[in-house]
Image: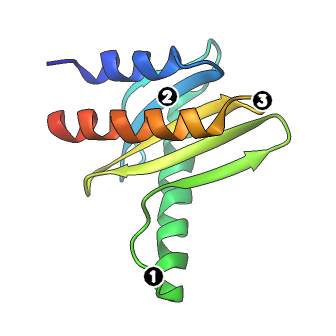
Amino acid sequence: MASTKDILTALTSVDGVSSAVCVGRDGFVIDASAAPGADVDAIGAMVSTGLGSAESVGKELGVGGLTQAMMEYKNGVIVMTAIGVDAILAVVAAENSSLGNVRIQVKKRKRDLEAIL
């Protein structure tokens, strides 16, 4: 069975993906495959807060549980998804990435991470 590091490294091999971080709901990093210089501890804390807020919006609006959140910025995209009830996967991709492919790869790797976490 692949390790969390193997799974995250596989995600960063997807064209345009620079970082993949798995964090606990408490914001602490479980594992990461990140671009040089990336502050994964800061990313972990922000991802935990961001996904929690997105889940609250969905609950308040009655649209069901969150499956995936995507935030587009001028120079990139962040895709976040819950891994079970205790963890979150965040992937950082370039603005010119194939977002469809990135989202498909995140869904595939989500299942792999759920199996080992």
Question: Could you tell me if residue 113 is visible in this image?
Answer: yes
Quick check: 11 above or below 103? above
Q: Kindly identify the residue that appears in the image at 48 percent across and 55 percent down.
A: 68
Q: Distance between the residues labelled 2 and 1?
A: 26 Å
Give whichever of 77, 5 is nearer the camera: 77
The image's mark for residue 69 is: none
N-term mark: 3 or 2: 2
- Label 1 residue SS: helix
- Residue neighbourhood size for the residue with mark 3, other residues' Cα within 10 Å, grouped as few (<14), some (14–19), many (≥20): few
Q: Kindly identify the residue that appears in the image at 54 percent across and 67 percent down.
A: 54
What amino acid is labelled 1 in the image? Answer: Lys
Q: Distance between the residues labelled 3 and 2?
A: 17 Å
The image's mark for residue 20 is: 2
What amino acid is labelled 3 in the image? Answer: Asn
- Label 2 residue SS: strand
- Label 3 residue SS: loop
- Residue neighbourhood size for the residue with mark 1, other residues' Cα within 10 Å, grouped as few (<14), some (14–19), many (≥20): few
Q: How far apart are marks 1 and 3 (CA)?
A: 32 Å
Give whichever of 3, 106 is nearer the camera: 106
Counting the numbered discs, the total is 3
Q: Kindly identify the residue that appears in the image at 77 percent across and 33 percent down.
A: 95
The quadrant where residue 79 appears: top right
Q: Quadrant of the N terminus?
A: top left
N-term mark: 2 or 1: 2
In this rendering, would 83 be left or right of 71?
left
The image's mark for residue 59 is: 1
N-term mark: 1 or 3: 1
- Indicate the position of residue 22 as horizontal and vertical percent values: 39, 35
Quick check: 46 above or below 93? below
- Indicate the position of residue 84 as horizontal and vertical percent values: 25, 53
- Indicate the position of residue 4 as horizontal and vertical percent values: 28, 24
